[in-house]
């Protein structure tokens, strides 16, 4: 493995979710009683934790097979050029400059991204746009991780 990044939800998301859950439980408790408030509090806490865990479990891996984002794999033979985007360029690529066919993995707490061109005429996605906290490291892993035969073929 050349590169691995786990995109977890920031602490602020957990604090905001806990405040929301507490206000919900307080409102329910005043309205229907303490036992229902405790039960709804448990259900609310489990629901919030499940949602935050789900949106925060993205993993980016660059290894000898290619780049894997969540459960999707782009093999080295199809990895084209890559470029790191700052916050402004990422906003543009997610908005007015976006291609609706692109494969996008982004989260609202990620400001920067890496765009990877897909060199496969049969693939419906022209590029992958991957949100990351470390765009330069991911870009370096993509350039250094390509197998030697793939690098020589792309240089020609």
Image (cartoon, rainbow, N blue to C red):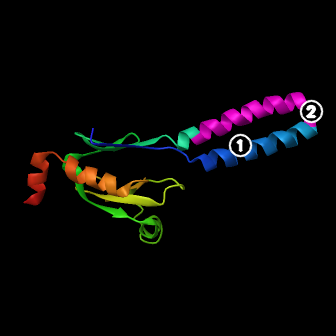
Rendered image quadrant of residue 68: top left
Q: Is residue 44 visible?
A: yes
Residue at 37%, 57% in the rendered image? 135
Residue at 13%, 57% in the rendered image? 154
**As displayed, is residue 93 above or below residue 32?**
below
Mark drawn on residue 18: 1
Looking at the rendered structure, the number of numbered marks drawn on it comes to: 2
Tag 2 secondary structure: loop
The residue most toward the bottom is 96
User: Does the magenta-highlighted stretch encompass residue 42?
Assistant: yes
> How far across and how far down the image is residue 16, in percent?
69, 49
**As displayed, is residue 65 above or below residue 93?**
above
User: Does the magenta-highlighted stretch encompass residue 41?
Assistant: yes
**As displayed, is residue 143 above or below residue 96?**
above
**In this rendering, would 24 be left or right of 96?**
right
Q: Which residues are magenta?
A: 32-52
Tag 1 secondary structure: helix
Quadrant placement of the N terminus: top left
> How far across and how far down the image is residue 21, in percent?
75, 42
Quadrant placement of the C terminus: bottom left
Residue at 85%, 41% in the rendered image? 26
Closer to us: 148 or 126: 148
Of discs 1 and 2, which sits in the foreground?
1
In the picture of the structure, the residue carrying the numbered disc 2 is: 33
> How far across and how far down the image is residue 57, in percent?
49, 40
Q: Residues within 10 Å of mark 1 (few under 14, many from 20)?
A: some
Q: CA distance from mark 1 to mark 2?
A: 20 Å
């Amino acid at each position: 493995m050349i590169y691995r990044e786990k995109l977890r939800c920031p602490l602020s998301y957990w604090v905001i979710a806990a405040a929301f859950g507490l206000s919900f439980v307080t409102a329910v408790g005043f309205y229907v009683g303490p036992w229902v408030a405790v039960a709804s509090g448990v259900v609310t806490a489990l629901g919030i934790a499940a949602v935050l865990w789900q949106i925060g479990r993205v993993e980016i891996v660059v290894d000898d097979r290619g780049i894997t984002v969540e459960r999707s794999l782009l093999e080295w033979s199809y990895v084209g050029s890559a470029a790191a985007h700052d916050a402004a360029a990422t906003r543009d690529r997610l908005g007015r400059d976006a291609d609706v066919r692109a494969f996008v993995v982004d989260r609202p707490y990620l400001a920067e991204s890496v765009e990877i061109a897909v060199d496969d005429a049969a693939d419906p996605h022209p590029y992958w746009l991957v949100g990351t906290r470390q765009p330069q490291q991911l870009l370096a892993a993509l350039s250094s991780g390509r197998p030697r035969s793939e690098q020589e073929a792309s240089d020609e």
